[in-house]
Image (cartoon, rainbow, N blue to C red):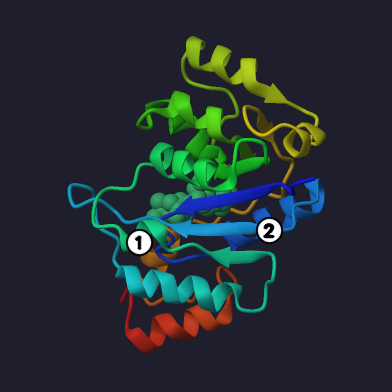
Amino acid sequence: MNQLQALFGGTFDPIHYGHLKPVEALANLISLSRVIIMPNNVPPHRAQPEASSQQRKKMIELAIADKPLFTLDERELRRDTPSYTAQTLKEWREEQGATCPLAFIIGQDSLLTFPSWHHYETILDNCHLIVCRRPGYPLTMEREEQQLWLEAHLTTNAEDLHVLPAGRIYLAETPWFNISATLIRERLEHGEKCDDLLPEPVMAYINEQGLYH
Ligand code: ATP
């Protein structure tokens, strides 16, 4: 049987423990052996990351060097067009074949904005959604029809993620980490320490490159 594979997308400006620790806990909770981190290429009309694509990529490599659970996928970074998650997940499904179980991991904040994503309704055709907890965000959707959409896809049985190829939303009981890349950038700008918020080699690289100062 094909093993469940999961993609974890984001800007990672910079990658931090709020990304890594919930996903490591998730992997233990639902027996996930492979998570592919996929940094996005931020389209020109959106607020640009402070770190370049190469710097964001390097920080991810440093963060996962001693963590075999994670690998890095550079496909969105290599593009010079906007990366739509729906399109990327469609391509990933085509590569992997119709039957293998695939999942996209997001934090709770992303679930709330999910219905505004480009072609969001096609995403569950190609993968499951696994939602990690994040402090400060409700677990119910803002609008009633969005809540109905969520409930129509929800499962509390992690086994579904392994046996079905796509189509379920799973709210994982991962630990809460009150960390964001915004918080880290602001703290560094004010000369405050962030040692407990991200891996040491990433912090060393930020200092060496003079990022976020
Ligand atoms: P920023 O503060 O710059 O908006 P961020 O810290 O939210 O960044 P992103 O790279 O935008 O990080 O997030 C990538 C993914 O990781 C998103 O799905 C987001 O919900 C999730 N995520 C980020 N931080 C946390 C956290 N502390 N707990 C759970 N999920 C998180």
What is the number of the mark on residue 34?
Answer: 2
What is the number of the mark on residue 164?
Answer: none
Going 66% across and 54% down the picture, which residue do you hit?
23
Q: Earlier in the sequence, mark 2 or mark 1?
A: 2
- Crowding near pointer 1: few (<14 within 10 Å), some, many (20+)? many
Residue 184 screen position, x and y as percent: 44, 65
Position of 94 compared to 131: left or right? left
Residue 50 screen position, x and y as percent: 29, 66
Q: Is residue 4 visible?
A: yes
Residue 9, placed above or below residue 166: below
- In the rendered image, the residue lying farthest to the left is 45
Label 1, secondary structure: give it.
Answer: helix
Nearer to the camera, 50 or 71: 71
CA–CA distance in space, label 2 to label 1: 20 Å
Nearer to the camera, 194 or 93: 93
Q: Amino acid at mark 2?
A: Arg
Q: Quadrant of the C terminus?
A: bottom left
Q: Is residue 190 visible?
A: no
Q: In the image, is the residue at mark 2 within 8 Å of ligand 1 by its beta carbon?
A: no
Position of 168 compared to 198: left or right? right
Q: In the image, is the residue at mark 1 within 8 Å of ligand 1 by its beta carbon?
A: no
Q: Amino acid at mark 1?
A: Leu
What is the number of the mark on residue 77?
Answer: 1
Going 56% across and 74% down the picture, which residue do you hit?
63
Residue 78 screen position, x and y as percent: 33, 63
Nearer to the camera, 147 or 134: 147
Q: Which of the 4 image quadrants contains residue 162? A: top right
Q: Quadrant of the N terminus?
A: top right
Label 2, secondary structure: give it.
Answer: loop
Nearer to the camera, 147 or 153: 153
Going 61% across and 36% down the picture, which residue do you hit?
98
